[in-house]
Structure formats: structure tokens, C-alpha cells
């Protein structure tokens, strides 16, 4: 993320305001050059930042990558269909076959002696196979195959036997299931645990993306309002410098006629120099903050070309922000910290993900170390014992449906039992339990930190709300004093400088109010981020004031 020059607006502008007040600048209205620029609203600027910021784009791409990996993992445990083809196969081997029968007496024959012959078989076929993982960690596989084969016995003298044509259809079903997993005969949690392990990357990427969006939005909001406040300060400094130059000219005339001292003139010139220095510093700070905001938006706009909203547009009396603060303080009473719901906090969510990951890993890791039960069933069609004409290719199909035929079948039940693994299974279980305990401790730490952070922010919201009420009361008093001083000036009992002093006090209260208002807005948005909400959504709810 782009480094932000300021974290709290008061740290940047506060010293400038102090210089302005010390310089004794008067308050007077002056047309701002900013009025001539098109207005860039805060939400428009944030849309550009969120849409163009490199860190946000990177976090979104990381989330998309994690989602693609999760989808691939899900597909790997889903149903699978395969076609296994064997276009051509030849098998030639030596076999023993009965010789020609011998007649031992009239009408009586006995089999001849076994003789060696060469058998050659040529075949083609294929198998369609379906497999599906089960929620219990097992797998079921079914297949249907067809093999066509032609075979014959070869004679050394070249007098080969007639070919024999055969077609063999077959079907099969196999079921395998880990048993005695995690102390259960069949653990139905395995499928969910496998899915949970695959989804860990997506969950962490989603938390990181939301955290990046909130952090970038908070930084952009603060920079946006700091820019506006610095522009106001620069305009005030420019006007103050003009007033001080006029005052110096009057003092020079007074020194010539002897009604002012050189010391007074020197003090006025020193005050002007301090104002010039403050003006240079504030301009430098403004450029730094403007560049920071431009970088956040990847230079998709130049903030110097626009006028900006002020924080008072979002923080006014009886506005939604005050209602939001009051609602938060009701939802999270200080005397019930242990009951606060902090499940949405980024650090807490990461810890919850780690706990679930450790639990899922403990469930799935025992599958590989468990016993396995398997059932296999196979069946194929068998020809009749006496076929009419094996050398007829057509009979290879018609004889299959001969009523004298039958089926060959096989059913088997198998069990694989691990007997000795050197203690691996026991030690692996110990490691899994320790991983869960460690993740739970980290979760407790994350929740404690979030609770402390939220408690501090809520307490600060209350203090800032009270400060705004006090400053508003002071401003009301200063405006009354201004009316009284202007009335005295009309009858000659007060000078223009005394009127300007009162106006300066009002400006001081207004600057302080803007500081507190910005702090209040940022603190509320930070609370929203702490609770796992969206900063932009909360800000959008505050845009329309009554």
C-alpha cells in the first residue's frame, strides 16, 4: 500500500493553525480560487481509488486466483467419467492342446497326447469408467467394457486352424471406504473437511481483499479532507499576509511621526515572516498530500484540478453520523465487553479460519492412516458351451443372446488393516491436537486485541461527540461577542482590530471543530472496519444529511 504521509489530520495542520493564530490574522471573507474548479465529490474520488488502486487490484486478483484453485479442487472430487480405449492388441503364446483322438478298439476313442501349439489372439476394445468421491471419504467406481477378439491356433506347417471370433461385454462395480476413522466406523465429516481445506485460500483472500479495501478507503478519505483543510489554511495565510503587509505600512508611517516605536515595527515584520514560513510549509505539505492521494488512485485523476467537499458536509448537528455513534454505543455498552460480537473482525476471522483449518486437517489426515474396506463385483456374458460356428464373425454377436449361454461373475470383500507404522498415527494425532489448541489461543488473542481496539474507539467517539457540543457552545458565544463588538465599533467604543480579534477567535473555534469532526468521522469508519463492515457502505449511508 502507498505510504501515507499523515495518519491524523491534526498532526499535519495543527502547527499551521497555531502559527496563524499567533500571527494575529484577521477573519474576512475572500473569494476562493477553488470555486472556479469543478467539484469532485468524496464518493466519486473513492470510486476512482477503489477502481484503480494497485493494492486493491492485486487483492482482488488474489481472491479470484484462490477461487479458481478452490473450483479446481472441488472438480477433482466430483464425478469423473473416463473412456479407456485399446484400439489394437496382439497376444501370441505357446499353449498345450489335446492331440487327435486315438481309436483303441472299434467305437472307442481316447484323447490324444497333449501337444504344443502357438496361439495368436488379436483384440480391440474399450471401457467406460465412472467414479465418484463420497462424503465419507470413500469412492465408488463403475465400469462397462466391451472387447472383440479373434484367435486361432497356428500350425508349423502353415495349416492353421480356423479363426474363432468372440465378443465379451462386462460390467463392474467397486466400492472402497476408510473405516475406523477418528474413532468412528465411518466418519461422515470427511467430505466437508476436504471441502473446508480447499476453501481456506478463498476465505483468507476474501478477508485480505476486504481489509485492503477498507484500509485504502480510510487513507483516501483522510487525505481528501486534509487537502481541503490545507487549502483553506493556505487561503487564510495569504489573506493574513496581505493584512500584515498593510499593518506594516501603517506602522512605518506611525514611526515617522513618532506615534509607534521601531520595536513595534520589528515585531510586525517578524510576524509577517512567520506567516510566510507557515505558508511555504503548508504549500509543501499540500503537494505531498495531493501526490499521496493521486498515487492511491494510480494517477487516474489530478486532485489539484478539482474543488473538494468539506468534512462539515458529512458531520452536522442531528446528522446520520451522530445517530450512528449513538447506535454503536447502545449496541456495545462498555459494561458488557465480553459479550461483544467480534466475529466479523479481520484478525478474528483469520483466527477462526485457522481453527477450522486445523480441525479439518485433523479429520482428513486420519483417513490415510485408517483401515480400508473394499467390495468388488464383476460380471461378464458367457457363450454357450457348444457354439454353432465360432469362425463366423456374425455368430460372435448372435451367440451372446443364445439362451444356453450364461454369466461369469465375481464378488470379493477385502479389508486392508495397518498393523504397524512406527507410532506415526499417534504422533500425527498429537500434532493435530496441538495445532488446534494453538489456533484457539491465537483466536483468543485476536479477539482480545479487537475488543481493546473497539473499546478505545467507542470511548473516543463519546469524547469527540462531547467536544463537538462544547465547541458549538463556544462558537455560539463568540458570535454573540462579535455582534456586541461590532455594535461598540459603530459607536466608536471599539476598533476594527478588536473586531478582527473576535473574528479570529471564531475562526480558531471553526478550525478546531473541523479537526474534531474529521477525527469523529474517521473513528466511526475505523470502528466499522474493526467490526468487519465496509467503510464505503457506511460512508454512503452518511452522505445524505437531513
Image (tube, rainbow, N blue to C red):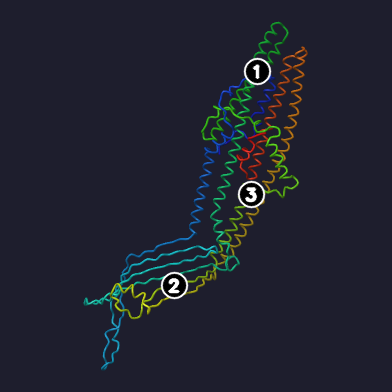
Q: Is residue 137 depicted above or below 119 in this figure?
A: above
Whichever of callouts 3 and 2 sits on the residue coming sooner in the sequence is 3
| 179 on left or right of 27 | left
Q: Residue at x 76, y 22 (%)?
A: 480
Quarter that holds the C terminus: top right
Q: Nearer the viewer, residue 473 or 507?
A: 473
Residue placed under numbered mark 2 in the picture: 378
Q: Residue at x 76, y 25 (%)?
A: 477
Q: What residue occupies the far top of the structure in this picture?
A: 257
Q: Is residue 390 depicted above or below 232 in this figure?
A: below
Q: x and y percent of residue 347 in the render?
A: 62, 47
Q: Secondary structure at mark 2?
A: strand
Q: What residue occupies the far left of the structure in this picture?
A: 157
Name the image quarter holding residue 330: top right
Label 3 and label 2: CA atoms lie apart by 53 Å
Residue placed under numbered mark 1 in the picture: 272
Q: Is residue 236 depicted above or below 324 in this figure?
A: above
Q: Nearer the viewer, mark 1 or mark 3?
A: 3
Q: Nearer the viewer, residue 8 or 46?
A: 46
Label 1 and label 3: CA atoms lie apart by 54 Å
Label 1 and label 2: CA atoms lie apart by 101 Å
Amino acid at each position: 500500500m502507498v505510504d501515507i504521509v499523515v495518519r491524523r489530520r491534526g498532526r499535519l495542520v495543527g502547527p499551521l493553525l497555531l502559527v496563524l493564530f499567533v500571527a494575529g490574522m484577521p477573519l474576512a471573507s475572500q473569494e476562493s480560487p477553488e470555486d472556479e474548479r469543478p467539484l469532485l465529490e468524496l464518493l466519486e474520488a473513492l470510486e476512482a481509488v477503489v477502481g484503480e488502486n494497485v493494492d486493491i487490484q492485486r487483492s482482488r486478483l488474489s481472491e479470484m486466483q484462490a477461487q479458481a484453485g478452490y473450483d479446481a479442487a472441488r472438480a477433482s472430487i466430483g464425478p469423473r467419467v473416463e473412456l479407456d480405449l485399446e484400439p489394437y492388441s496382439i497376444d501370441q503364446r505357446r499353449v498345450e492342446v489335446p492331440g487327435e483322438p486315438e481309436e483303441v478298439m472299434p467305437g472307442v476313442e481316447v484323447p490324444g497326447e497333449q501337444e504344443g501349439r502357438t496361439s495368436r489372439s488379436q483384440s480391440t476394445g474399450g471401457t467406460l469408467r465412472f467414479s465418484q468421491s463420497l462424503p465419507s471419504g470413500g469412492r465408488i467406481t463403475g465400469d462397462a467394457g466391451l472387447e472383440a477378439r479373434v484367435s486361432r491356433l497356428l500350425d508349423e506347417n502353415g495349416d492353421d486352424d480356423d479363426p474363432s471370433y468372440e465378443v465379451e461385454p462386462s460390467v463392474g462395480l467397486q466400492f472402497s471406504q476408510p473405516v475406523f476413522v477418528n474413532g468412528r466406523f465411518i466418519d461422515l465429516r470427511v467430505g466437508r473437511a476436504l471441502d473446508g481445506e480447499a476453501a481456506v485460500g478463498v476465505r483468507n483472500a476474501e478477508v485480505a481483499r476486504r481489509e485492503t479495501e477498507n484500509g485504502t478507503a480510510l487513507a483516501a478519505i483522510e487525505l481528501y479532507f486534509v487537502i481541503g483543510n490545507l487549502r483553506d489554511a493556505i487561503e487564510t495565510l495569504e489573506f493574513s499576509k496581505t493584512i500584515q503587509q498593510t499593518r506594516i505600512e501603517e506602522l512605518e508611517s506611525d514611526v515617522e511621526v513618532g506615534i509607534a516605536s521601531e520595536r513595534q515595527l520589528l515585531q510586525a515584520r517578524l510576524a509577517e515572516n512567520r506567516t510566510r514560513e507557515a505558508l511555504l510549509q503548508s504549500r509543501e505539505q499540500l503537494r505531498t498530500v495531493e501526490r499521496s492521494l493521486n498515487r492511491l488512485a494510480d494517477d487516474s485523476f489530478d486532485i489539484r484540478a478539482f474543488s473538494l467537499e468539506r468534512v462539515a458536509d458529512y458531520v452536522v448537528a442531528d446528522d446520520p453520523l451522530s445517530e450512528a455513534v449513538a447506535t454503536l454505543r447502545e449496541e456495545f455498552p462498555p459494561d458488557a465487553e465480553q459479550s461483544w460480537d467480534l466475529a466479523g473482525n479481520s484478525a478474528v476471522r483469520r483466527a477462526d479460519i485457522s481453527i477450522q483449518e486445523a480441525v479439518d486437517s485433523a479429520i482428513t489426515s486420519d483417513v490415510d492412516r485408517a483401515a480400508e474396506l473394499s467390495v468388488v463385483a464383476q460380471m461378464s456374458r458367457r457363450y454357450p458351451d457348444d457354439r454353432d460356428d465360432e469362425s463366423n464373425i456374425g455368430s460372435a454377436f448372435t451367440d451372446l443372446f443364445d439362451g444356453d449361454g450364461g454369466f461369469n461373475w465375481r464378488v470379493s470383500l477385502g479389508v486392508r488393516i495397518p498393523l504397524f507404522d512406527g507410532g506415526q498415527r499417534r504422533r500425527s494425532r498429537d500434532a493435530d491436537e496441538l495445532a488446534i489448541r494453538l489456533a484457539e489461543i491465537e483466536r483468543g488473542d485476536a479477539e482480545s486485541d479487537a475488543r481493546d481496539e473497539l473499546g478505545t474507539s467507542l470511548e473516543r467517539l463519546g469524547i469527540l461527540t462531547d467536544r463537538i457540543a462544547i465547541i458549538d457552545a463556544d462558537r455560539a458565544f463568540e458570535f454573540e461577542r462579535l455582534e456586541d463588538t461590532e455594535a461598540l465599533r459603530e459607536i466608536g467604543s471599539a476598533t476594527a482590530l478588536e473586531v478582527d480579534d473576535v473574528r479570529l477567535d471564531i475562526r480558531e473555534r471553526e478550525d478546531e471543530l473541523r479537526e474534531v469532526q474529521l477525527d469523529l468521522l474517521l473513528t466511526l469508519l475505523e470502528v466499522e472496519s474493526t467490526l468487519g463492515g465496509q467503510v464505503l457502505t457506511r460512508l454512503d449511508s452518511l452522505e445524505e444529511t437531513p
